[in-house]
């Protein structure tokens, strides 16, 4: 199957989308998702409009989308585990299958009461990640629902929180940087214990006297290109989907700069100790946000 190779090869995008069709999914979890782990710890209620995942000492839980996607704008409203959530991880991500999988991650790393969650993001291509950026949030993500969005197009991946971009990963395949654009991915979300690393590098363990831990979900929406097994001639037309060509304007770049200046707590692109032989190519070649905002 043909693939997007460079900014000048936009004509190949349509070929890559053959056998895919547009889907705009509503928020009904019965119709759009399957619980895959934890038995009744993954609970759909309110006529399919809401879902909760539960973690106790015996098991966590999880669900996945029924459909697989190749590009789209995927969003969900989440309310995270309140109180002492140290050692817990609420993961919300796109992933393909196999040993050379692609993946686009939101992971929310719990903390002791009064300390902020860490929002961990990563991009995997062909089974290799190591592209972590981490953030604090500018609100309490346990007090109410907030919207977390993954925009995935042939040109870029953008992570949004309440429609504010916090991170952009551009397609630089033409410079030798791998980019996930060939494998279909499902949406997954899980709540699990990772107290060997999640909170302060594993120094703070899960307090099971606080269990069960619960994360809540609503308003799942996937405006995406969905695998169509019944037809070989359908495709996702970029003319009908504003997200397909979506890019950050000056105002959105300013929002992202604000987040990264004030709330970013780790950036692999500045970790020279981790990469003593030189930073990854995309870190050295992509202009920083401040430069992109300059006249």
Image (tube, rainbow, N blue to C red):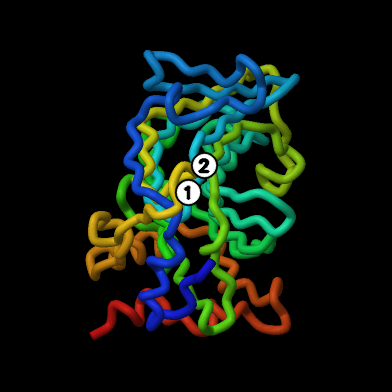
| Residue at image location 51% in from the left, 35% down from the top | 65
Q: Nearer the viewer, mark 2 or mark 1?
A: 1
Report the residue marked by disc 1. Answer: 69
Which label is found at residue 225? Answer: none
Task: Name the spot of residue 266 as percent of width and height, x first.
Answer: 56, 61
Q: Residue at position x 60%, y 34% from top?
A: 190
| SS state under label 1 | strand
* 78 in relation to 56, above or below: below
Q: Secondary structure at mark 2?
A: strand
Residue 238 left/right relative to 55: left
In the image, taking residue 127 as reference, residue 111 lies left or right, namely left
Q: Is residue 156 left or right of residue 164?
A: right
| Mark 1, other Cα within 10 Å: few <14 / some 14–19 / many ≥20 | many
Q: Position of residue 89 (x, y in %)?
A: 61, 37
Quadrant of the snapshot with the C terminus: bottom left
Image quadrant where residue 263 sits: bottom left
Query: How many numbered callouts?
Result: 2
What residue did someone put label 2 on? 187
Q: Earlier in the sequence, mark 2 or mark 1?
A: 1
Asked if 177 appears above or below 187 in the picture, the reply is below
Q: Residues within 10 Å of mark 2 (few under 14, many from 20)?
A: many
Q: Nearer the viewer, residue 278 or 148?
A: 148
Determine whether 21 is above or below 12 in the image: above
- Residue 180 in view, yes or no: yes
Q: CA distance from mark 2 to mark 1?
A: 8 Å
Query: Looking at the picture, how far across and down is residue 197, in whole percent?
Result: 72, 45
Q: Name the spot of residue 228 as percent of width and height, x first.
A: 45, 45
Q: Residue at x 73, y 34 (%)?
A: 205
Is residue 159 at all visible to an observer of this figure? Answer: no
| Mark 2 touches mark 1? (CB < 8 Å) | yes
**Vertical position of residue 8 compared to residue 81: above or below:** below
């Amino acid at each position: 199957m043909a693939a997007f190779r460079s900014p000048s090869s936009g004509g190949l995008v349509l070929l890559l989308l053959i056998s895919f069709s547009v889907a705009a999914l509503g928020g009904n979890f019965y119709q759009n998702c399957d619980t895959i782990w934890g038995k009744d710890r993954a609970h759909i209620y309110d006529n399919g409009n809401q879902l909760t995942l539960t973690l106790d000492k015996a098991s966590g839980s999880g669900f996945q989308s029924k459909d697989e996607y190749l590009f789209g704008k995927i969003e969900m409203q989440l309310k995270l585990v309140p109180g002492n959530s140290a050692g817990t991880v609420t993961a919300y991500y796109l992933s393909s299958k196999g040993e050379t999988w692609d993946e686009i991650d939101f992971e929310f790393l719990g903390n002791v009461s009064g300390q902020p969650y860490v929002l961990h993001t990563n991009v995997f291509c062909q089974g290799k990640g190591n592209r972590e950026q981490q953030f604090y949030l500018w609100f309490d993500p346990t007090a109410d629902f907030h919207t977390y969005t993954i925009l995935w197009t042939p040109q870029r991946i953008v992570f949004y929180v309440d429609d504010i971009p916090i991170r952009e990963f551009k397609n630089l395949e033409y410079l030798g940087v791998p980019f996930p654009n060939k494998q279909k991915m499902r949406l997954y979300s899980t709540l699990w214990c990772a107290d060997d690393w999640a909170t302060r590098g594993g120094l703070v363990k899960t307090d099971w006297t606080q269990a069960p831990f619960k994360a809540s979900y609503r308003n799942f929406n996937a405006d995406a290109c969905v695998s169509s097994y019944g037809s070989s001639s359908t495709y996702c037309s970029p003319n009908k989907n504003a997200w397909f060509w979506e890019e950050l304007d000056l105002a959105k770049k300013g929002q992202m700069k604000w987040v990264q200046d004030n709330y970013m707590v780790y950036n692999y692109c500045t970790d020279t100790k981790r990469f003593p032989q030189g930073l990854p190519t995309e870190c050295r070649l992509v202009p920083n946000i401040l430069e992109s905002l300059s006249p």
